[in-house]
Amino acid sequence: MPADSSVQQRFSTRAGLLLSALGIAVGTGNIWRFPRIAAQNGGDEGAGALILAWLIFLFLWSVPLIIAEYLIGRKYRFGVVGSFVKGMGKRFAWMGAFVVFVATAISFFYAIIVGWALYYFFQMLFFPLPGNTQEATIIWDNFQQSMWPFALHFLAVAVGALVIWKGIKSIEKVNKILIPVLILIIFAAVIRAITLPGSGQGIAYLFRVDWSQLSTPGIWLQALTQNAWDTGAGWGLFIAYAAYMHARHGTVKNAFITGLGNNFISLIMAIMIFGTVFSVLQHGYGYSDGQVLEVMQTSGPASTGLTFIWLPQLFARMGAGSILSIFFFLGLAFAGFSSLISMLELASRTLVDRGIKRNQAVLIVAAVVYLLGIPSAMSLNILSNQDFVWGLGLMVSGVFIALFLAKYGLSKLREETERAPGDWPLGKWWEYLIRYFVPSAGVILLIWWMWLSITVFAPGEWFNPLNPFSLMTVLLQWGIVLGLLIVFNKKIGKLYS
């Protein structure tokens, strides 16, 4: 049993819980990752196929898994590994440990992206906005070639560790400030973006469906991993926060609000990016749809620089743009911090559950996240590889959480769960999705992707682990982690039993 008194803390209000849950969901996954994934997967006619598949997975994958995580955390009052051991038995400790590792591995490079946002906040604060794409690209390239990514990576991890130092009470207080400010800033920026001349072309492209794309597994795979990225479903983060829930706060309504609110933010961020880029390149330079898309897809490896190259140009074209740019990148940093602290809390709570004092656990996690994030700070290709490998790993994590509940007994858990006043009833639909759809969708999409990686996507490179987007780089990294966890499963199980 954990000895640290911080595990007895609870969220003081439902608003604090909901804002903290939105802090998990609303982050750089919405503002940085979603627009670039939409750009990377745009077809000849539009990017709407990805949007459609992404919305489908919100209701079939993400919301059911968020509900599941709330129920698990509230029932066991442990972190992920402790909950798996209590609910499934010591033989399955490795499954919980893999879920924790995936979320923690994402934090290694996620903290770097938070550092990017901090850099651009100071860039916008002290220097003029770039007037064109060339100037914006120079700022981005010079930053990536400097030591700033390393220094700001350290700062992001250090501030995140400071926030979680005293537990959920400080996390709740911080999110009550970060999330409302972030949402206000985003709305101010998107209102200006949609009024730019020619922005309607970009917005129309974003939502126009190229129906032929829906027959390809890549779209569905990207849609599922992005929705998991967006919402935090299957990361185990909601399990960690739900351990601090009061029973009166409920689960079902909160899960829907979290998922829908998160996806709404993602959509308006994509509207902002696509509207801006199309306005600048089509209205300003006469580019065709295809030429605009090519530019978006080549803004850094896997479009990693898309938000940072194009948003400064958006602000340069609006009244009071300098002031808004400062607040926007501050908001982006806030969004990153709100998600980063949940990842740090997940890993720290895992150590606290095995008897380590919170302050020691936080220091250990902060040191590991910083050190193992250094390779991604050194290279955008490594960062893109880690994003790819562990983004796919979220599907495995989601399947493991579904298997957890199936073994424990979905009907049994529903019967044991006290329905909070005003919460929505949890119907049979949730059982069917968790028992059948989530495991099946995860396994089928992974097998489908593996097969096409060998036969279509990279028939000459799929076996090369040094290719950052090959099948072998995924299998090798997953295999190393899973192999070690299975070998040490007995020891892990004893630590949490």
Image (cartoon, rainbow, N blue to C red):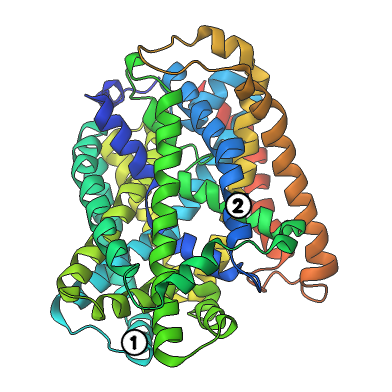
Q: Nearer the viewer, residue 328 or 439?
A: 328
- Residue type indicated by callout 1: Asn
Where 272 sits versus 177, above or below? below
Residue 293, how many percent across, how many down? 55, 78
Residue 269, how many percent across, how many down? 39, 60
Q: Is residue 250 visible?
A: yes
In the rendered image, the quadrant that contains the N terminus is top left
Q: Which residue is mark 2?
A: 52
* Residue depicted at 31% across the width and 53% down the height: 335
Q: Nearer the viewer, residue 268 or 81?
A: 268
Q: Earlier in the sequence, mark 2 or mark 1?
A: 2
- Residue type indicated by callout 2: Leu
* Residue depicted at 48% across the width and 80% down the height: 299
Where 310 sits versus 424, above or below? below
Left or right: 161 with respect to 354?
A: left
Number of numbered labels in the structure image: 2
Q: Please identify, in this view, whether the residue under mark 2 or under mark 1 is nearer the observer.
A: 2
Where 240 sits versus 58, above or below? above
Locate residue 342: give its quadrant. Answer: top left
**Residue 142 image label:** 1
**Residue 330 image label:** none
Mark 2 is surrounded, within 10 Å at the Cα level, by few (under 14), some (14 to 19) or many (20 or more) other residues, namely some
